[in-house]
Image: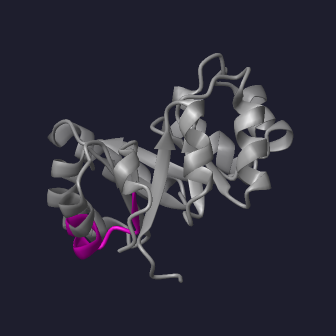
Amino acid sequence: MENTFRIIPSVREMKYLKYALSLENEYIQPTGAHIGSLQQWITLCHQAGKKVVVNHELIGGLGNDKMAFQMLKQMYHVDTVIGSSVTKLHMMKNLKMKTIYRISLVDSISVQNAFKFIEEVKFNAIELRPYYHALELLPVFREVWQGDYYVAGFVNTREKMEQCKKAGFRGAMTSTRELWSLRL
């Protein structure tokens, strides 16, 4: 099971959560939640035996300070947090939360900056995005850090999923519902 390629459903609307929960995926990412509905999303996921990955930057109404992160851990019982701010992720690591460093590959400067921070904060995993650049740059990132890498951003076909697995990604996060039940 450890080498299984993980597809993490990125659920934008509550009406699709039931479908996502019916699948065999270990993780769910509630990208359509806001602070008022987050508890309900997480409770439903945990009741279904799923782990919850939250991008703290996409939860409407959630602050970005230590108090907000303590809420994610103690009140909401989030399993893993994704973010692009190294400072915020460092705060979450200090709270003993699992973290995924989200890197948007927009230019060579963003890549250089990411390399600086990878060694500074010991993330549990790294998300590279979007798909095209992630696929191209994964070997370069592997030279710097050997941990688990996930891909996101325009991973919207079976062929792209297969390429991501073949390239060595641990998994992919996608909002394309047709891919949520895919087994690779």
On screen, residue 118 above or below 58: below
Q: In the image shown, does 82 or 171 lie closer to the viewer?
A: 171
- Residue name at image x 76 percent, y 34 percent: 40
**Quadrant, the C terminus:** bottom left
Q: Position of residue 106 (x, y in %)?
A: 20, 36
Q: In the image shown, does 165 or 156 lie closer to the viewer?
A: 156
- Residue name at image x 26 percent, y 48 percent: 156
Going by the picture, which residue comes out furthest to the top? 61
**Residue 73, quarter of picture:** top right
Residue 161: say if magenta: no
On screen, residue 52 above or below 72: below
By what rule are the colours in the image chosen? one colour
Describe residue 136's horizontal placement relative to residue 177 as left or right: left
Q: Position of residue 128 (x, y in %)?
A: 32, 51
The answer to whether residue 9 is visible is: yes
Going by the picture, which residue comes out furthest to the right? 75
- Residue name at image x 66 percent, y 40 percent: 91
The answer to whether residue 116 is visible is: no
Q: Position of residue 72 (x, y in %)?
A: 74, 37
Q: In the image shown, does 42 or 116 lie closer to the viewer?
A: 42
On screen, residue 160 above or below 105: below
How many numbered markers are drawn?
0
Describe residue 143's horizontal placement relative to residue 75 as left or right: left
Describe residue 111's horizontal placement relative to residue 28 as left or right: left
Residue 167: say if magenta: yes
What is the magenta range? 163-172
- Residue name at image x 36 percent, y 55 percent: 179
Q: Position of residue 178 (x, y in %)?
A: 35, 51
